[in-house]
Image (spheres, rainbow, N blue to C red):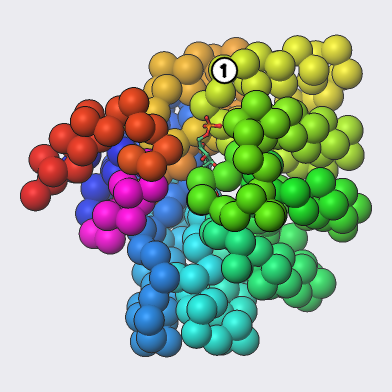
Amino acid sequence: ASRFVAGETMEAAIEQAKRINQQGVTVTLDYLGESVSSLEEAKGCELAYLDLLQAIRASGIDGNISLKPTQFGLAINEDSCLASIRKVTKEAACLGLFVRLDMEDSPWTDATLRIVRTLKAEGYKNIGTVIQACLYRSRQDVRALSAEGINLRLVKGAYKEPPSIAIPSKRKVDANMRHLIRTRLDSGVYTAIATHDEEIIRWVKSYTRTHNIPRTAFEFQMLYGIRTPLQAALAREGYTVRSYVPFGRSWYPYFVRRLAERPANVLFIARSLFKRG
Ligand code: FMN
């Protein structure tokens, strides 16, 4: 296995999750795969996630799941994607587990939010999604989703987006990230703050302290294998910390994205990537 993927199988991922839990860090498990090209493949993904939910419960690990709507066929048929995600969400609800829809690139933003809102309106409380600080629309989305009481993970954004819809400067994305975090923390609706940016993490710690925002209202999230000591340190300080743990054979797109994000580490990550072969 590589430093950034927990293994090819669900069993390997559960083992890693146990190890991470021992550090006081909770997990969200992500079955790797990107856009599927047939509804059969989407069905396969649904079954994999249903198995995963059972395995989380059976193993007793502290964790939940993250999934990508295009893996459930969003690019093929939105209704069948919704039906499939509903099945997973329903099973998760029975088991007392939470489901987060990762946010993919901008062609899928509206449909992803529609699915989350539909399931929320049907009464599912164990569902949430992600908002990306790089998009201009996100301030409005965060305001609306906060009023609707929808659980959000806030991130800067992992996809390359056109300048017509996305903030071009890194500094301004960082400022928008803080703005969104503040809006959410002030709203009181549960928020996951997913970043490795230590300045932002420090700022969140001080903002929540001075504004008496309870630690039960938010959590920090980081990727498996990145800033591991910081994850454990925050957990020791009493913050909820969740590690995003990807597993599965379809790891390549994930790596391509990591490479695009961290040009300084291309060589290192490329090495861990090719070592898998
Ligand atoms: N980026 C997305 O575009 N969609 C996601 O759903 C998403 N989920 C993430 C989950 C976690 C736990 C983390 C740590 C990051 C996630 N990202 C996601 C990536 C971030 O948008 C960002 O590209 C990456 O964390 C690098 O920025 P940073 O320096 O703030 O960590």
Quarter holding the N terminus is top left
| Magenta stretch: includes residue 257 | yes
Percent across and percent down for residue 46 are 44, 74
Crowding near the residue tagged with mark 1, few <14, some 14–19, many ≥20 C-alpha atoms within 10 Å: few
Secondary structure mostly seen in the magenta stretch: helix
Residue holding disc 1: 198
- Magenta region includes residue 219: no
Q: With respect to residue 47, does 94 lie above or below?
A: above
Looking at the image, residue 236 lies above or below residue 72 = above
Kindly indicate the quadrant of the structure image that contains residue 227: top left
On the rendered structure, is 81 left or right of 48? right
User: Which residue sits at x=39%, y=65%?
Assistant: 34
220 or 108: nearer the eye? Answer: 108
Which residue is depicted at the point 57% across and 45% down? 157
Is residue 256 shown left or right of residue 192? Answer: left
Q: Is residue 42 left or right of 113 when viewed as pictured?
A: left
Q: Label 1 is placed on what type of residue?
A: Glu
Q: Nearer the viewer, residue 74 or 152?
A: 74
The magenta span reads: 248-258
